[in-house]
Amino acid sequence: MAKIPSEEMIDMMENMLHIASDSTRLKILICLEDEEKSVSEIVKEVGASQSLVSHQLQVLRAANLVTYRKEGTSVIYSLDDEHVSKLISVVREHVEEKMDR
């Protein structure tokens, strides 16, 4: 039987899942699943304005779901670590299974 984590851990998990549940933020996470991208590349793939994407990237950075580095005048984003990629992958697989039924 699984042990229920502490309230602090539950709160942190809830917050992370809540942040990832926004459709624009989820699109950004999926966009970064395979490779790092510049803000302009993310804007193009997600189909949202640069201001919206930039704001959502700030939210994702604050939640430690994405990280960034500067390359000249460009900012390049990537998923923070493999756990974020696994989370997106597992959710996608689960939904695909349910859709195939």
Image (tube, helix red, strand yellow):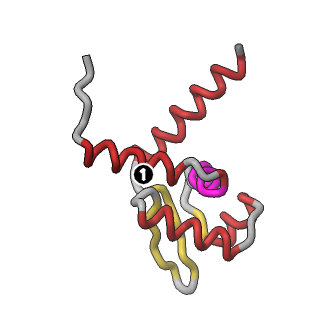
Work out whether 56 lies above or below 16.
below
- Which residue sits at x=50%, y=66%? 59
Q: Is residue 10 magenta?
A: no
Q: Is residue 30 magenta?
A: yes
Q: Which residues are magenta?
A: 24-31
Quadrant of the image containing the C terminus:
top right
Q: Tell me which amino acid carries mark 1.
A: Asn
Q: Residue furthest bottom?
A: 73
Query: Residue 86 at what x, y percent from top left?
Result: 46, 39
- Which residue sits at x=74%, y=71%? 49
What residue does disc 1 label? 15
Residue 97, by quadrant, is top right
Residue 83, by quadrant, is top left
Number of on-image labels = 1
Query: Residue 47 at what x, y percent from top left?
Result: 77, 61
- Which residue sits at x=45%, y=73%? 69
Helix, strand, or loop for circle 1? helix
Work out whether 93 lies above or below 6.
above
